[in-house]
Every structure is written in C-alpha cells, then in structure tokens.
Image (spheres, rainbow, N blue to C red):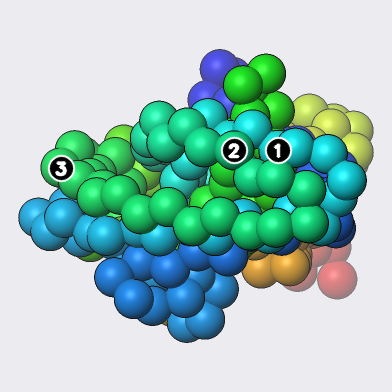
C-alpha cells in the first residue's frame, strides 16, 4: 500500500501549478557556448565546461541588483539539479548589463539524464527571481543518476502494483464493490503513465511538461480504472464441468 500511495502522490504532483509571473519590464537573455537559450535544446555535458552569458535588460525606473544566476532542471514537479553562481552586478534603470562566467557541471552526470525542462534565472539579494528564460535541456548524464534511479523506482512500484492487483483478481480477493476494485487498479495506471513520461525523457524523445505528462498520466490511469471497474465480482464463480454435465442430464 505504501508503494500505491507514492504513485498516487506522484500523479497528484503533476497537476498544473501556478505559472511564475515574470515581470515583463525586466528581460533576461542568455546563451551557453554561444547558443541562445530557448532556441533548440541546451546540451549540458558533465565532462565539459560551459561558458554562460546573461544579459539583463532593465526597462523599469528602478535599479535592479542581481546577486545570483541559477540554472535548474525540473521534471514531474521535482527539481533534479540546480547550479547557483554568484555574479553580483547592478542594472541601472533603462539600461542593460551583460555578464559571463564558466559553468562546470561535473556532478551533473549523477543527477539527471535525457531531456528535461531547464530554467535560467537571475536572482536578487532578497533571493527573489528578477527574470528567467526557459528551454529544453539535453543532459548527458548517467542512467544511474538520481533521475534515472527515480524512474527505476517508479518502475518497480508500478510492477508491484500491477502484480498485487492481478494476483488479487486471480485469487478472487478484490473488493465486492466495483468502485473499490477500480481504485485498486488506479495506482498501477498512474505508475504506467509515469513510466511512459520518464522513458520518453530518458530516450530523448519528449521532455516532461504538463502538456506531455498529463495526457499520459490521465490516459493510463483511466484505462486501469476502467479495467478494475469491469473485473468480475469476486463472488461469481465460472461454471464448472460438473455443472455443465448436470445441465445436460436434466435436459
């Protein structure tokens, strides 16, 4: 039951969260190794040092004080890596400033792998985000990274959920109520959807995002729910050969 609860929690966490309201008067432009962030996939290789350049355009009437540049990767409502680089500089009103710095993601290989949503943002001295830009990151990490291990854990829990539900079905130990039988299969369906999302990400086919995650999760959960709903009542017994012979004799 603990595994089923974890799968349900993962599914709930995928519900769309409130979008970050970025101040439109402060614009952030960034590039990594000369490639603009937001144009194509951002390749992050743990074995290579990347040169990051950020330009903050302050169209407000107030001074903007930047303290940190953060590069983070998230999936399934979880942050799997984040790099904070202290680059303090001020951006006067109605002007822009550019700063560059090296990024050495040496431990990135043990944190994530595949396509992940990546955010580059500048943070002020109060630890609040001033502006940000989002893109899809292609992380050249290891399958045994935190993200890969998370996917393997979901795979194991999903297999256990399916095994438990199917064994209970075979032994006629499912609840008599149809809705309860459907709920017994629901965690396995959610886990199946999560596996699909993570697999597509690791295989570098589709990056996790609400538009990609929700159809897989809801579709797999609905299919498992319906499967549990239409399972036979545990009290119903299929006609045996002796029953069939009795019917023939009576005729």
Q: What residue is shown with label 3?
A: 106
Q: What residue sits 15% from the left and 42% below the top?
A: 106
User: Is residue 45 at all visible to an observer of this figure?
Assistant: yes
Disc 3 or disc 1, which is closer to the eye? 1
Determine whether, in the image, residue 171 is placed left or right of residue 146: right
State the SS at label 3.
loop
- Seen as rendered, the residue at the extreme bottom is 40
Which residue is at the front of the view, 7 or 239?
A: 7
Q: Position of residue 66 (x, y in %)?
A: 58, 35
Q: What residue is shown with label 2?
A: 90
State the SS at label 1.
strand
Determine whether, in the image, residue 183 is placed left or right of residue 213: right
The reply to whether discs 1 and 2 touch (Cβ–Cβ < 8 Å) is: yes
Q: What residue is shown with label 1?
A: 64
Q: Give the quarter of the figure containing the N terminus.
A: top right
Q: Where is residue 47 in the image (x, y as percent from the top left)?
A: 9, 55
User: Is residue 11 at all visible to an observer of this figure?
Assistant: no
Count neighbours of disc 3 (C-alpha within 10 A) and say few if under 14, some if 14 to 19, many if 20 or more: few
Q: Give the quarter of the figure containing the C terminus.
A: bottom right
Q: What residue sits 19% from the left and 38% below the top?
A: 107
Determine whether, in the image, residue 23 is placed left or right of residue 35: right
Count neighbours of disc 2 (C-alpha within 10 A) and say few if under 14, some if 14 to 19, many if 20 or more: some
Q: What residue sits 42% from the left and 52% below the top?
A: 99
């Amino acid at each position: 039951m603990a595994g089923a609860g974890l799968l349900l929690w993962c599914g709930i966490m995928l519900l769309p969260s409130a979008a970050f309201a970025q101040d439109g008067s402060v614009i952030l432009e960034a590039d990594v190794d000369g490639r603009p962030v937001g144009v194509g996939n951002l390749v992050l290789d743990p074995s290579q040092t990347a040169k990051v350049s950020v330009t903050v355009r302050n169209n407000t009437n107030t001074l903007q004080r930047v303290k940190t540049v953060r590069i983070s990767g998230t999936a399934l409502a979880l942050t799997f890596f984040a790099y904070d680089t202290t680059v303090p500089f001020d951006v006067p009103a109605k002007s822009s400033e550019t700063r560059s710095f090296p990024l050495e993601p040496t431990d990135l290989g043990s944190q994530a792998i595949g396509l992940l949503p990546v955010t580059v943002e500048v943070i002020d001295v109060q630890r609040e985000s001033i502006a940000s830009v989002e893109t899809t990151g292609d992380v050249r990490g290891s399958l045994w990274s935190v993200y890969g291990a998370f996917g393997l854990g979901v795979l194991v829990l999903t297999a256990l959920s399916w095994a438990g539900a199917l064994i209970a079905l075979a032994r006629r130990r499912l609840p008599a109520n149809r809705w309860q039988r459907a709920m017994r299969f629901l965690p396995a369906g959610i886990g199946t959807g999560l596996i699909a999302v993570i697999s597509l990400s690791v295989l570098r086919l589709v990056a996790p995002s609400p538009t990609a995650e929700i159809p897989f999760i809801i579709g797999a959960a609905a299919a498992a729910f319906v499967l549990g709903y239409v399972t036979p009542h545990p009290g119903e017994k299929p006609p045996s050969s002796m029953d069939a012979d009795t019917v023939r004799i009576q005729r």
